[in-house]
Every structure is written in structure tokens, then in C-alpha cells.
Amino acid sequence: MIETKTIGSSGQISFGKHNAGKTVTIEELNPGVWIVKTALVIPESEFILHTEPYKSRLSEAISWAEQNPAQASDLKALTASLELPKTSRKRSRS
């Protein structure tokens, strides 16, 4: 579909309200010839999560979490299992 649009005095062009807020890339092939595409942007600090081996590890973790729903914890039993055995030695006072 071809539409005719006019670029406003501030250099803007409207792609309609249904596209409001979308991020786009604009490729200028020649002067006056542009290709506009919607795009998803990955923050630089999160990019590593989309590379191997992190991508596979995250997929495995998500699969595991989907197959193993969260359960309530018995905090008293957990605390008891983590307590160190009590020694019979008394601490000397200085």
C-alpha cells in the first residue's frame, strides 16, 4: 500500500496513532529514499543474555521453572537443617 504524506516544517511525519510510541529504524538508501522498520531494542547491559552460553542457560532455567512450580517453604525445617551442631565446650570469659 502506498500513501502520500507531507513532512512537516519540524521534519516530522506521522505514521498514525496505532504506531505511536514504537521504536523504528530508518535506512536511507539514497537521498529521499528511506526504509522504515519497527524495531526492538535490547539494552546494552542485557545484550549478553542473548548470547551463548547464557541464552541456553536461561532457556533451561525457564523450562525447569515451568515444570517445577514454586512451593511454600517450611522455614523452621530449613533453619534446623542449616544449624551447626552445638559443641559442649564453653567459651572462656576474658
Image (cartoon, grey):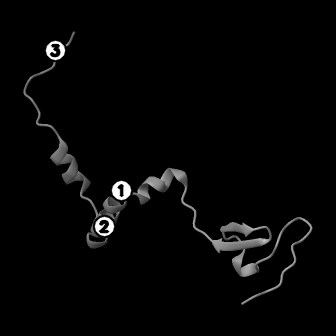
**Residue 70: % across, % down:** 30, 66
The answer to which of marks 1 and 3 sits earlier in the sequence is 1
Q: Is the N terminus in the top left, top right, bottom left or bottom right quadrant? A: bottom right
The answer to which of marks 2 and 3 sits earlier in the sequence is 2
Kind of element beneath mark 1? helix
- Which residue occupies 63% across, 73% down? 38
Going by the numbered disc 2, the residue's amino acid type is Ala
Q: Which residue is mark 3?
A: 92
Q: Which residue appears farthest toward the bottom when viewing the image?
A: 1
Q: Which residue appears farthest toward the front when viewing the image?
A: 30
Q: Which residue is mark 2?
A: 65
Quick check: 55 left or right of 24?
left
The answer to which of marks 1 and 2 sits earlier in the sequence is 1
**Residue 44: % across, % down:** 53, 52
**Residue 63: % across, % down:** 30, 69
Of labels 2 and 3, the one closer to you: 2
Q: CA distance from mark 2 to mark 3?
A: 49 Å
